[in-house]
Image (tube, helix red, strand yellow):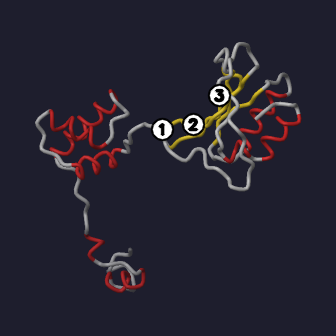
Amino acid sequence: MLDQKDGLFSIRQQCELLGLNRSSLYYRPMGESEDNLGLMRLLDEQYTRTPFYGVLKMEAYLRSLGHDVNTKRVRRLLRKMGLEAIYQKPNTSKTNPEHEVYPYLLRGLVIDRCDQVWSTDITYVRLASGFVYLVAVIDWYSRYVLGWALSTTLDADFCIETVGSLLEHRKCEIFNTDQGSQFTSPRFTLPLLDKGIKM
C-alpha cells in the first residue's frame, strides 16, 4: 500500500482496487495469553514423553494437573504447535478391484527355513515436515530385513524396485503381502510368478 500523501489514490481507493477490506489494514493479531503459553509448554513436555497421546489424553493430563480445559481448546493449541499423535494411519493398503486377489497360503504352514516365506508391507515414517512411506521385505524365518526403500508417494514403483533388486540375487518359495494395490499390480506380481514364486 502506498502512503496517501505519496500516491495518487487514497487508502480507501487502493483497498477497493485490491479487493481488501480496509479494516484488515489496521488489524494487529493478538498473541497467545500467558495461560495458553503455559498450557502449550506443558503439552509440549508431555508430547515429548508420550507422542502417542491424542487430544483426549492430553486434555485428561492437563485436567490432572488442575487446569480447567476443554477438548476444543486442547485441539487448537496442539494444532497451533503442529503436534499430532503418532499412530498407525489408515489407507496405506487400498485394494484395486481390477487386480487379481491371491489366496492366503500361510495358514497352518510350518516355517522352518530361510527363503521359505518373504513378506512385505508399507508403513509411514513421521518427519518434522511431513512423512515418507517405508516398504520393507522380511524373511519370516530369520526375521531379517532383506530390503527396504522410502518414497514420498504410495505408487507401486518403490515396491517393485525393492523386490526386483532382491530377485536378482535370490528368491523365496512364497511371497506374502496384503491385498494393497501396490502388491497386486501385475508389474509387481509377474516377476515373482515368472520365477515360480507363489503369491
Assign a secondary structure to mark 1. loop
The type of residue carrying mark 2 is Thr
Residue 190 or residue 63, whichever sits in front: 190
Q: Which residue is mark 1?
A: 88
Residue 55 or residue 182, whichever sits in front: 182
- In the figure, residue 113 lies in which quadrant? top right
Look at 75% across and 47% down and name the residue there. 185
Place of residue 20 in the rendered image (x, y in percent of width and height, measured from the top left): 36, 78
Place of residue 52 in the rendered image (x, y in percent of width and height, measured from the top left): 37, 34
Assign a secondary structure to mark 3. loop
Dividing the image into 4 quarters, which one contains the C terminus? Answer: top right
Query: Alpha-carbon distance for marks 3 and 2?
Result: 24 Å
Query: Alpha-carbon distance for marks 1 and 3?
Result: 25 Å
Q: Which residue is mark 2?
A: 123
Assign a secondary structure to mark 2. strand
**Up/down of 130 relative to 173, above or below:** below
- In the figure, residue 34 lies in which quadrant? top left
Tag 1 and tag 2, C-beta contact below 8 Å = yes
Q: Earlier in the sequence, mark 1 or mark 3?
A: 1
Answer few, some or many: residues within 10 Å of disc 2's Cα (few below 14, many 20 plus, some between 14 and 19).
some
Look at 34% across and 29% down and name the residue there. 50
The type of residue carrying mark 3 is Arg
Query: Alpha-carbon distance for marks 1 and 2?
Result: 8 Å
The type of residue carrying mark 1 is Gln
Place of residue 17 in the rendered image (x, y in percent of width and height, measured from the top left): 42, 84
Q: Which residue is mark 3?
A: 107
